[in-house]
Every structure is written in structure tokens, then in C-alpha cells.
Amino acid sequence: LERIVVGKVISAFDLALSYDAKKNIYLALPEPNVSLDNIDIQYMLSTSANGANEKKPPIAVTWAESVIQGVRKVDKSFLVLAKEQMRQKLVEEALAMPDLSSRLRAIREVVRPSVELNMLINKQLEQCLMDDGWLDAAVLDANPLTRTGGGSSIPVTSVTTSLLIMALSCFPGSMSELVHVLDGQRDVSSLVNDTLEDSGVDQEGKEMLHQALVLAHERFRALDEGMQEFVLTSALEKAIDGVLATPSAQTLYRRAIENELLSPLTRDARIGKYIIDEVRTVFLALPSYLQARILLTAVRFENAKSEDTASVGNTPEIVGALVAQGGVVAAKLAQVLAEDPNIDPTYRNVLGTMRDENDPMPAAVFWGSIPRPVRSRIARLGQRLGTGSVKQVYRCEFSDEKGCDWGMCAVAVLRQHVEEEALASLEALSFSNELAPVAKRLGRLVYGEFSLFAEGEALIEFATTSISTGRFKVVDVLHNSSKVLVEQMAVGEGLTKALDSNIKSVEEMSATKKLLAKYHNAVLDAFLVSGLIHSDIHLGNAVQSEDVNGEPGFIIFDIGQFVTIDGASRLALLWTLSSISNVERRTTLRAIALNHLGRVSCLSPVVEESYNTPKELRRRLENAYEEAIQPMENGELPSQRTAYIMFLRAAEKQHISLPRGAFPVAKLIDGIISQQEDLDLELVFDPKIESFLRRNITWFEYASVGWKSFRYLL
């Protein structure tokens, strides 16, 4: 009966002359309801874990039977096949329509709110934005995306896709090898042999597993690239959730993590065992959707499992890719680790570039993240200007007709789910003995960036400082609230581009370098004179432009988190920086630096009250200083920048609360010195500090320096 009814509907659909007629026939046909209960992930996980052979469980045959039965059930449903075929034809006709609004309206009429609908809308909007440079606000408002708290919980339209996710999520063999088969990097037969090796399964069972994998592979390859990624991530997340709910399966999962995630790292001698242990601890504490993203990235590195030298050389690339999938906290952690002199330089370079590598969220997601009162004033959305680990920025044109005369602006919103990811990641870091102290500092860094209102206020305040004068200006803030920041457009050329030798002449680059050196001077002067620490002088935070008189300058549109400290704290930090600048000063200026630090530091509350004395504080400061200036593993003495960072970390371990500008100063040093070294700029840091301290030194300190210098020479 179903075949007869559906056959007549398909005939009528094929004979219909207009799109609307076909659409009405499609909508009149009821949605299919196919149960997939025959694939029970919990049952398979528990059976697999408790079986006699944990390595190659015979449950693979049960899995194969379930998959084949599920596919047959779907294939035998004339209603399912008819709905999917008709929907596909309608979508193809809709995509051929001439204008964007018509295409999207037609798609929304035949595809219910789902992952597939989101992908279709995103693809159309992104293509239009790429071709025309703008998207009308009316089009964006008419096409909101289906949004939930997590990607895999958004419904899926296709029954076949749902079946595929369910089947892959409880595959009883190696997930990495399954991914390679689905990606076309390995043949099905070899995976069958590996999965059933020493399992005692007869030929019929092997053929059944082969058939099931072929069916899964065919249906997976029929999907577009975006849906393939969604299917794999969702399947992994579902499998991990099943493992976490099945204690007996957790041993197998831990074994898989060792093989798929940690094995490539253990082959590189530069990564110590303690680091591997910390990675394992943190990873297992992450929520399942983050674990899924990281694992999928790990298994997709084809060379990760080979034992040759090339795979070891590829390890830094693998580490960078894995960290990139860990979200905002992982990006910030990478920046912190990039400052650690004990980490191999190759890894430090990889980790140090993580701030520049963030996957952008689609324009439709960005639009939906703008609060309605601000969104209602926008006439059209332009090109994406930047993507950070916390926020994303687009060019927007505000409309006079909507009562807003701001014109062209840069609009920033927080990235989707960034707060949830940060909370989960920081909680995971707290399980690590090594990284738990760092987690608190990371929390301050990350959570401090979640308030765009505070960022706007910082820009407004920064515009009144000595840095934002003359050739260096801060953009005007037009609106700032907790979820959105609207700035005047900074029109000019990015500094990275202005310093690119491939497109700029030597004269042009020289002029930009001189201006950058003046900017460094202005930043240091602000610190020395008023205690203002501008710690984020990244080249991507400003553009080069000309004023009305044709004078070149910088327009600053992102300042990160800046702080202002009091005179005593400023003097203590400057003496510390000067004292560790070379070997002689680590003897002659050490006592003066620690005296000043002792006046502005204290021991944290974890130290028992009876030990919390000035004498104990001095002892711990001495220990931290001594640890910071010790030779490194290669026998070399640490540089000024390295020694200062080591001192901060040693002070943390000694439970010393240094003045609040201590860590921002580290970022300031790193930013200025790195740019000076990379671009061969004028060295301004040490001379300015020395000049300032000479003007502020006391007679007692002067005498101390003279006496210790004399003894040092002896």
C-alpha cells in the first residue's frame, strides 16, 4: 500500500510543471518515522568491554548485522526514499533561482530547521558575501539559523544521516582506521581483517562486516564535505558520551587515547613524560564535544602512526592543530607556554602563533549574536575584519533611515559558545598538578575579555593617555555593552602588510619601522611616567594611516587589557627588570630590586599565618630570584626576558603575590623585544629603564651599587 501511494505521489511530482506545484506535493506527503533502536550503543559498549577478547571483540558481527538491518529498513521505506529524493530535487531547483532572497525562502520551505538547513543557508550567504561584499540586513533577519547549546544536538533532516551517526558512534574497531576508510585513505578489506583478527569469526561474519562498512562508506561519501565533518564529530561525541556512561568501557577508551592521541607525541624526545601525563589528565577532564574535536584532528594526521623520522618532524604541526581545536583557553595557554624557555624553540614558535589561527564563525551566526537593539540599526553586513579566540569583527553599515548616523563601523561580538568552552576547559586544567596554578591566571586573562563593555571602556580611557597623542590615535567607541562593541572604522593598511618585504619597498618598510620604534618609545614613556602598561602591542591591533596633513601614524583599534600601577610598584618592577638584564647586574642590583619588591608584594593566603612574615617573604623572593637566573638545560644563562618570566613562575610556586602589573609587564617586554629582534628596530627598552632609574635612585642605593660593583670586579 505504501509503495502504491508513494508511487502515485512521485509520478504527480515528476509531472508537475512549476516549482510551487512540486513543493505542495512534497509538503503534502507526511514525514517518515523510522526507528533506529536496533543499534544500541550502550549494549555494544558494555558487551565489547566485558567480552573475552577486548582487543578484537566479536561484537563487530552484531554491529554489522545492526547496520545492515538499519540500512535495509531505510531502503525499504518508500516514504523515506521519496521524501529525500523529492527534497533533493526541490533544493536543486531552489539553488538555481536568480536572487538570494528567493533561493533562501524556497530552501526554508522544503528543508525543516536542521543541520542541513543551517549549512545550506550558511553556504548561500557566504557565497553572496564573497561575490558582492555585502549582505542586506533584511535578508539576514529573514534567515535565522537553528541554534542550540551544542552542535550535535541540532536535529538532522535525513534519516540516512541519523543512521550513519548512530552506526559510526558504536563501531567496535579502531576509530582512527575507520576515519581513514571513510576518508578514502584505506580500503575496507584491511579494516575488516584488523578488526576481526584472532576473534574466531567465520567467513560469513567477515563478509557481513565488509558489507556493513561498504554501506557506511557509500553513504558517507555521498554527503558534502560539511556534512561529513558534522557526522564524524557527532559520532565521536556520541561514542565518548557512551563511554563515560559505561564504566566498563572506559578502559578501552583510555587505551584508544594512548594510541590515537598520545602515541604521536611520545615519539618526540622533546616532549617529556610529565607533559604527556598532563595532556592525558586535562584531555579526559574536557567535555565530550571538545574531546571529539581534538580526537578527530589527531586521527586525521595520516603520518602520525608511522615510526619514521618524518613523523617525529611532523609532531609540532600535530600539536598546533590539536591545540587549535581546544578553544579559547587552549589558545591562551599556548601563548603562556610559548614564553616558557624550557620548551623546545620549535614548539614555542608553533604555540606562539596560535592567536592568529582561529576558525571564523559564519556570517549568519555572527548576525544572530548581535543584540537586537543594535542589529536593528544596521543596514547591511560587510566583510569579516578579524577573528580572534574570543571575539569576531565584521564591517557594518549603520542606516540613517533607522535613526543612526554612525555610517561605516567595525562591530565585534563574542564567539558562539566561547564562555561555555572556557568554563569547561578551565575546570579541566584544574585537574592538572602542573597547570592548576596557571589556570587561575588564564581565567583572569580569558574572563577579562568576555566583557565587551569593559573593552570599550578601556579604549575610551586609553584614548586619554599619553600614548594616544600625535601620530598614534585610538578609534572612537560608538557603543559598548556586554555582548557587542561598535567602533569607528580604522581605515588604513595593516602593519603586518606594511612590513611585508614581498610587497613593500625598502624605503616604505624603513619608514614604517621608524614609526614603530616611535610607538615603542611612546608605550615605554607611558609606563615610566604614569605607570600605564599597554601589554598587547601585537601588529594586528593597529593600522597605518595618514592624517589630514599627510603625516603617517597608527590607528589603534584593540588594546587588550591594560593596567595602571602605582609609583612604588612601577619602581619595583623596573629595578627587577634592570637587575636581571645581564650577569653583573644580577649581583650588583639584586638586593635593591628585592628590597623594592618586598614593599609591594605579599604572601598568598595559603601560607600559614605564623609563617606570613616580612622575613619569610624575603626568603621566598630570594629563592624565586635564584631559581630564575640559573643556567638552562643547554647550559646557557637565561636572557633578560626569559629570566623575568622564570622569576614570575618561581614566585607563583613560592606563593608570592607580586604587584598586579608584574605579568602585563612580561607581555610588554615580550612584545617590544620580539618586534625589535624580528624587524631589526632601534633598541629602546634597556636604555630608557636605565635612564629612569638613574633619575630616581637614592643615595643609599647609589652607594650599594658602587660597593657591589667594586666587589664584583674583584
Image (cartoon, rainbow, N blue to C red):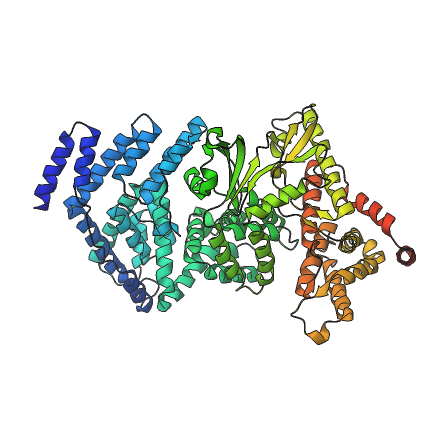
Residue 136, above or below 60: above
The quarter in which the C terminus is drawn is bottom right
Residue occupying image coordinates x 57% and y 59%? 439
Q: Specify whether 59 is left or right of 391.
A: left
Farthest residue to the bottom: give it: 610
Farthest residue to the top: give it: 549
Q: Specify whether 150 is left or right of 630.
A: left
**How many numbered marks are there?**
0
| Rendered location of residue 165, percent (x, y) | 30, 51
Residue nearest the observer in this picture, 371 or 29? 371
Residue occupying image coordinates x 9% and y 42%? 5
Residue occupying image coordinates x 59% and y 55%? 444
Q: Specify whether 391 is left or right of 589.
A: left
Identify the image quadrant of residue 365: top left
Q: Is residue 573 visible?
A: yes
Q: Is residue 186 visible?
A: no
Residue occupying image coordinates x 20% and y 52%? 34
Residue nearest the observer in this picture, 219 or 455? 455
Q: Specify whether 376 is left or right of 452.
A: left
Residue nearest the observer in this picture, 291 or 151? 151
Identify the image quadrant of residue 25: top left
Identify the image quadrant of residue 146: top left
| Rendered location of residue 349, percent (x, y) | 60, 46
Residue nearest the observer in this picture, 639 or 555? 555
| Rendered location of residue 560, percent (x, y) | 62, 45
| Rendered location of residue 173, percent (x, y) | 33, 57
